[in-house]
Amino acid sequence: MKNDTRQRARQRLDERLKALKPEDRFKTPPKGWLRAIRDALGMRGVQFARRLGIRPQSVETLEKSEASGSIQLKTLRRAAEALECTLVYALVPNKSLEEAVRERAYKIAVRDLGRVAHTMKLEAQGTGDADMEARIDAYIRDVLKERDLWNEK
């Protein structure tokens, strides 16, 4: 039952994250979002500093840290608010979460069943490769269903 709950959670997240694809639409501008938005608004660094409550000299450091990826999220959120923006933060998986779990289970099943097949061959009890996919599917369904797939390499 725990597996069904996880699967439903993955499916819900996959559906929500679909709207963020393709993620290259959100590629950071060369000088960072803060600078790009501030420039687009026609806001000078001194004005931005005043809204943030920092020294004008700190604006350049702030914008460079955002562009380089070293800014803290809470600082970025404060700067976004000073620009009357909302910080949106998300992790966008390279493939669906459901697909990632399926691939991981498949990899473990192939590895585990490969060991069994090798041992059986050594004992002259080898099975043919013809039904390997069916054995993999059954192994995933029956053995891996409740197993922690991420606990091992």
Image (cartoon, rainbow, N blue to C red):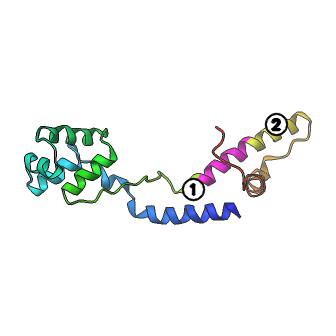
Give the residues drawn in magenta, as a range. 101-111
121 lies left or right of 57: right
- The three-letter code of the residue at mark 1 reads Glu
Q: Nearer the viewer, residue 9 or 92?
A: 9
User: What secondary structure characterizes most of the magenta part?
Assistant: helix
Badge 2: few (under 14), some or many (20 or more) residues near its Cα, within 10 Å? some
- The three-letter code of the residue at mark 2 reads His
Q: Which mark is residue 99?
A: 1
Quadrant where the image shows the C terminus: top right
Q: Earlier in the sequence, mark 1 or mark 2?
A: 1
Quadrant where the image shows the N terminus: bottom right
Q: Residue furthest top?
A: 122
Q: Which mark is residue 118?
A: 2
Q: Residue furthest front?
A: 53
Please provide percent x and percent y for residue 62: 21, 41
Q: Callout 2: helix, strand or loop?
A: helix
Q: CA distance from mark 1 to mark 2?
A: 28 Å
